[in-house]
Image (cartoon, rainbow, N blue to C red):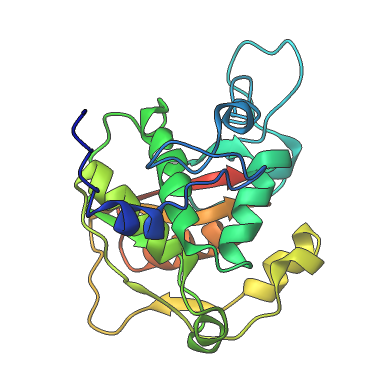
């Protein structure tokens, strides 16, 4: 009579953090995975050509570096914002379920996507002193229950070894950016961030982290605060590009 396999005492714990079903189609997945092979294959990875400044993809025959219309007529205070995946289909559902559906376990998947930005030539080989998550206003953090940028920054720290420092503070409760166009987003964010009391970024190289980049207005406003406080450089990374 064959010996019975002993139960795995950690299976329940693993399932708590990685539910054994695909986050999109509910198919059974392997332990530690959030997407089945089919849905993972539908995740739209951003590949060249794209804007060197904000990673906006371009469908065309451009072979060299270029700047998109979103960036050409304004000042963006970060050196470059690198995104890994396009907010379409599978990727958009994962992001929305994580951010608004309280599917916190999806931070593991989004964290892996975010870590892929480190291989981009705009970030690869650079030394960063701190990872800086984009802050939420305390009232909004209480409403949501978490700051998605902080969770993703922690995931990136585990993969990069770079420390996370919450040196920025959100000073105004602003309306959600999703309802505004680009110029309205910029106006909505004026004066919305400041350096935390006692924080020092003088001559440091910072990597800003957020979940999604749409127009780049939030990242630019944060980068402006850091540079005015003496930061040597500010790059940005997001898991998803809107």
Q: 25 or 92: which is nearer to us?
A: 25
Q: On screen, 63 above or below 25? A: above
Rendered image quadrant of residue 153: bottom left
Q: 113 or 63: which is nearer to us?
A: 113
How far from the left and from the top, in percent, is residue 3? Answer: 18, 33
Write the residue at 23% across / 56% down: 203
Q: 138 or 158: which is nearer to us?
A: 158
Which quarter of the image is occupied by the N terminus?
top left
Residue reaching furthest to the front: 1
Q: Across the whole image, how many numbered discs are drawn on residues?
A: 0
Residue 239 as seen in the image, left or right of residue 14: right
Rendered image quadrant of residue 218: bottom right
Residue 10 as seen in the image, left or right of residue 101: left
Residue 206 as seen in the image, left or right of residue 219: left
How far from the left and from the top, in percent, is residue 78? Answer: 48, 49
Q: 133 or 20: which is nearer to us?
A: 20
Residue 129 visible somewhere in the drawing: yes
Residue 236 visible somewhere in the drawing: no
How far from the left and from the top, in percent, is residue 154? Answer: 31, 58
Write the residue at 69% across / 13% down: 62
Q: On screen, 80 above or below 12? A: above
How far from the left and from the top, in percent, is residue 194? Answer: 43, 78
Write the residue at 81% across / 60% down: 181
């Amino acid at each position: 009579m064959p010996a019975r396999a002993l139960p795995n005492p950690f299976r329940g714990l693993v399932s708590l953090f990685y539910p054994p079903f695909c986050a999109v189609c509910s198919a059974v997945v392997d332990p530690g995975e959030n997407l089945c092979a089919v849905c993972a294959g539908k995740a739209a990875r951003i590949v060249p050509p794209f804007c060197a400044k904000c990673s906006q993809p371009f469908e065309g025959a451009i072979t060299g570096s270029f700047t998109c219309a979103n960036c050409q007529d304004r000042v963006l205070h970060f050196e470059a914002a690198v995104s890994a995946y396009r907010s379409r289909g599978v990727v958009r559902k994962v992001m929305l379920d994580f951010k608004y559906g309280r599917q916190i376990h999806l931070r593991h998947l989004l964290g892996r996507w975010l870590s892929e930005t480190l291989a981009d030539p705009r970030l690869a080989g650079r030394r960063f002193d701190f990872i800086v998550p984009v802050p939420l206003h305390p009232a909004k953090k209480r409403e949501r229950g978490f700051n998605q940028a902080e969770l993703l920054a922690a995931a990136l720290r585990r993969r990069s070894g770079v420390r996370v420092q919450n040196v920025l503070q959100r000073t105004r409760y602003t309306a959600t950016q999703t309802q505004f166009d680009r110029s309205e987003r910029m106006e909505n964010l004026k004066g919305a961030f400041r350096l935390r009391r006692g924080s020092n970024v003088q001559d440091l190289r910072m990597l800003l982290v957020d979940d999604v980049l749409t127009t780049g207005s939030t990242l630019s406003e944060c980068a402006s605060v850091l540079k005015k406080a003496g930061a040597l450089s500010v790059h940005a990374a997001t898991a998803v590009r809107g």
